[in-house]
Amino acid sequence: MKQRLAAIGTVEALPHRVAAFLSREIESGDLNPGSLLPTEQQLSEKFGVSRNVVREAIAQLRADGMVEARQGIGSFVLAPEQRAAIRIDRETLKEGQNMERLFELRCILEAESAALAAERRDQEHLDAIKAALDRMSGEERWEDGSIDADLLFHREIARATGNAYIHTFISFVCEQIRRSIYYARQTNPLHDLVEVNVGEHVRIYEALVAGDPAEAEAAMSAHIIGAANRVGVKLPASRTRHTDGGK
């Protein structure tokens, strides 16, 4: 099974590769609509990965509208007509203009999400965001596992808004830019990239702790504009207006 996973692609992190494999099984009919996915333990053994990897993969499938979680039971495969999800063909993101549009969408969604989170977060939210930040800045910072922590940081901020729709949309968008984070780590000096990236996330977190919506919005916008630049995407000048709000 590990060989089958490797065949999916070597550039994506494990959760995405597991999700991609399961998605193909759903699309091919090997996993029928209405069927219950195997348990985390069963999938972990099947793919030879940790349960955390499986959990992230299933979260991606939920964000893509492929499966539906039912509390206390598990995740069920949805029929195509039941999938209320936006789909983006990742192949189209190889075109620079489409990647620019995706980062522009991130800037709009996540800047406002950060501002709302600064107003609405509680200590539990802050603890979850800090846990993701600690993973990013700890021993995992040199490894691809830090990509998962990075995306989790953004999803936890979206969760802190208290708006499930915001969380759903941002979770979806996060998965679309996973490959761009990997690409940035391959094309920029890793030490400098990690230091800058962690510093941007620290500024966001500090604004959330302070409960400062304007600073949180500005910090998030600055981070996304910087992230876009690091993969060769320059956002329109109109997006940079957000970076002045908290200074």
Image: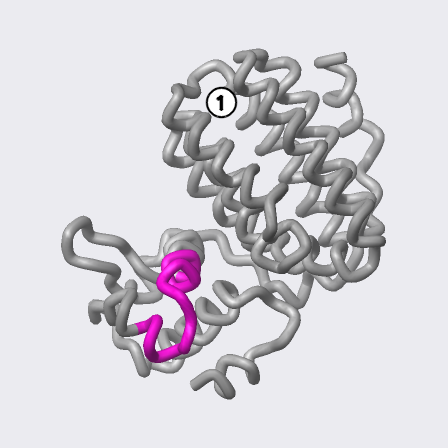
Q: Determine if the magenta segment contains residue 157.
A: no
Rendering quarter of residue 59: bottom left
Q: Picture coordinates of residue 16 (x, y %)?
A: 51, 65
The residue wearing badge 1 is: 117
Q: Is residue 119 above or below residue 177?
A: above
Q: Residue at x 39, y 19 (%)?
A: 122
Q: Residue at x 50, y 80 (%)?
A: 5
The residue that appears at 33% across and 81% down in the rendered structure is 29
Which range of residues does the magenta coloring cover?
A: 43-57
Image quadrant containing the C terminus? top right
Magenta stretch encompasses residue 55:
yes
Count of labels shown? 1
Classify residue 244 by image quadrant. top right
Residue at image point 42% right, 57% down: 56
- Decide which of 141, 82 is in the foreground and name it: 141
Q: Is residue 116 left or right of residue 51?
A: right
> Position of 51 compared to 4: left or right?
left
What's the residue type where badge 1 is placed?
A: Ala
Residue 119 picture location, percent across and down = 48, 14
Is residue 234 visible in the rendered image? The answer is: yes
Specify the quadrant that holds the N terminus.
Answer: bottom left
